[in-house]
Structure formats: structure tokens, C-alpha cells
Image (spheres, rainbow, N blue to C red):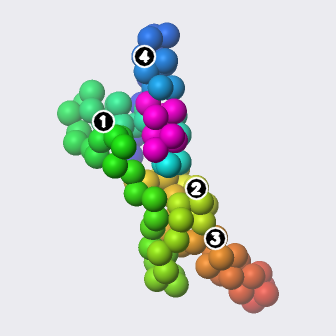
Amino acid sequence: MKTVNVLLSDDEFDAVSAQVARARAAGSIASKSLVMRTMVRESLGIKSEPMNGEVPRAKTCTQCGESKKLTDYYGHSKTKDGLRSECKSCKRSYQRRYLAAR
């Protein structure tokens, strides 16, 4: 993975901020960095999913298999949706087991 530094004009920055506001109003946990990555990918011709009103409101945990609200997941900047794959309760359980074993 390569790092790309991007300079934005005031109008471009306002457009990113507006996109983030729309995504959050639709129930997404979008961040400016996620929107920026999407814009950079589009400018480089890399296909990515559009950030429109069709935002998932739930996600299935990879550990317990339950479908939970997006607020039940910790953030993770490297994933496509910006969230960890395991829910908060599974992550806490894992951390407790890990620390107890140390």
C-alpha cells in the first residue's frame, strides 16, 4: 500500500465535508479519511463502492455470528467499511482471555 498526500482547495474540502455529513445522516460512520480514499481511488481510476444513501445499518460479527448495529463495532481505518470484523463484546472477551493468559 502506498501513501498519497492530497492538497484540496476550499471547494473540494467543503465537498468532502458535505459527503461525510450526508453519509452520517444516512446512518453511516463515514470519516473524512474514508471519503478522501474514495475520492483518490476515483481520481486514479480505481473502482470503489459509491457513498450514497444505501448504507448498511447492521453487520454480522465474524466471531459470534450475530447481526448487530454498526455502533456495536469499534472503528478500524484499514477496513473497507471502517469497522472491525468482530463486535465490541467479542473483542472485549478476547482481550480479557488474552490478558488473563499473560
Between tags 1 and 2, which lies in front? 2
Which residue is the site of mark 4? Answer: 12
x and y, in percent, of residue 49 in the image: 28, 46
Query: Circle 1: is it few (<14), some (14-19), or many (20+) Cα within 10 Å?
Result: few
The verdict on residue 23 being magenta is: yes
Taking depth in this image into account, of 3 and 97 the one nearest to the observer is 97
Going 49% across and 10% down the picture, which residue do you hit?
A: 10
Name the disc covering residue 88, or none: 3
Q: Tags 4 and 3 in contact by the CB under 8 Å rule?
A: no
Quadrant including the C terminus: bottom right
SS at mark 2? strand
| Quarter of the rendering containing residue 101 | bottom right
Residue stretch in magenta = 19-26
Q: Which residue is mark 2?
A: 75
Q: Give amino acid for label 3.
A: Lys
Residue 5 visible from this viewpoint: no
Residue 46 left/right relative to 69? left
Q: Is residue 63 above or below residue 13?
A: below
Q: According to the image, label 1 marks what residue? A: 41
Lateral position of residue 49 relative to residue 4, left or right: left
How far is the residue under mark 3 from the one under mark 2?
A: 10 Å
Q: Earlier in the sequence, mark 1 or mark 4?
A: 4
